[in-house]
Image: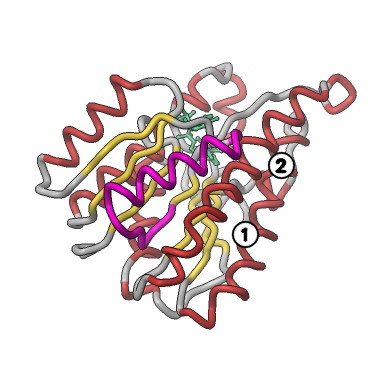
Amino acid sequence: MLTTRTAVITGGSRGIGRAIATEYARQGCDIALVYHGNEEAATEVVRQAQQCGVRAQAYQCDVSDWAATQTTCQRILADFSAVDILVNNAGIVHDNLFMRMSEADIDEVLGVNLKGAMAMTRHLTPTLLKSAHGRVINISSVVGLMGNPGQANYAAAKAGLIGFTKSIAREFASRSVTCNVIAPGFIATDMTAGLPESATEKLTSLVPLKRTGAPEDVAGAAVFLASDQASYITGQVIQVDGGMRM
Ligand code: NAD
């Protein structure tokens, strides 16, 4: 159980972020949900979390905007007093062959996936270091470990997240704050819904377990990493990919 803890989850209004927020609430964790655009969806996740008897509140914020993340973290701390768990889940893709990739494609993908996670972590570092159960959980991707044609920007951001996590894992270890990465494989969410049938079939054929993952598969790993059972695990990359990369 995660009772008496507060978690901040970015990109929490849908997909993997929503599954993590919902499962954390079921575990008794208070939730500060950071969303980008869809207030209605965020409000619905908050409402469902509150039905589990926990405190929950939604905050609109573009995580690629440093000043906005600072203000948002200040608001979260004013409302919840302290934060124990940070899940950096917000992510976007702008796929293209590298020879056609624009500066904006690179800036935006690095801005949300990598700098966004660094910004949120930076502003919440003082409260995380004070927590007796401090956790940073960064949602990367197997693509950050394997590379993928058409995703040079995204793979670079997700690989960067791994180096970032291992560095702060070493810095925060003296305060018993653990920092880990979850690297999902092919998970059925809005991010992958737009893929053509042929691409979906090809990707699924690469998965030994022969199915796409569900957001709840990733949420299970996020619950474990946040729990006391995972207190001796830090600086690790946990793949949730049906065996896609071994
Ligand atoms: P999704 O598109 O459903 O969710 C992404 C979330 O990030 C959304 O809630 C979105 O609003 C939020 N977001 C985007 N830009 C933002 C910004 N500037 N500021 C704040 N929030 C922002 O996709 P998902 O599959 O649920 O992805 C969640 C995470 O998992 C992402 O980091 C993604 O890269 C990663 N991931 C997904 C898969 C997959 O197959 N679906 C695989 C590997 C990794």
Q: Which residues are magenta?
A: 64-86
Q: Is residue 149 above or below residue 246?
A: above
Amino acid type of the residue tagged 1 in the rendering: Met
In the depicted view, which residue is nearer to us: 165 or 183?
A: 165
Residue to which mark 1 is pinned = 246
* Quarter of the rendering containing residue 33: top left
For mark 2, what is the residue? 155
Quarter of the image where the C terminus is located: bottom right
Q: Position of residue 115 (x, y in %)?
A: 65, 44
Residues at marks 2 and 1, CA–CA distance in whole angstroms: 17 Å
Select label 2 or label 1 by which is in front: 2
Q: Residue at x 45, y 27 (%)?
A: 36
Judge from the rendering whether residue 205 lies leftward or rightward of residue 136; answer left or right. Answer: right
Find out whether residue 77 is within the magenta segment. yes
Identified by mark 2, the residue type is Ala
Residue 200: x and y in percent read: 55, 26
Which of the marked residues, 2 or 1, is nearer the chain's N terminus? 2
The one nearer the camera, 153 or 218, is 153
* Residue shown at 55% from the left, 51% from the top: 183
Residue located 68% across and 24% down the image: 94
Disc tally is 2
Which element is circle 1 on? loop
Give the prevailing secondary structure in the magenta stretch. Answer: helix
Q: Is residue 132 left or right of residue 164?
A: left
In front of the other: 79 or 214: 79
- Disc 1 crowd rating (10 Å Cα; few below 14, some 14-19, many 20+) is few
Relative to residue 195, is residue 51 depicted above or below? below
Is 36 covered by the magenta stretch?
Answer: no
x, y percent for residue 120: 52, 48
The vertical placement of 112 against 120, above or below, is above
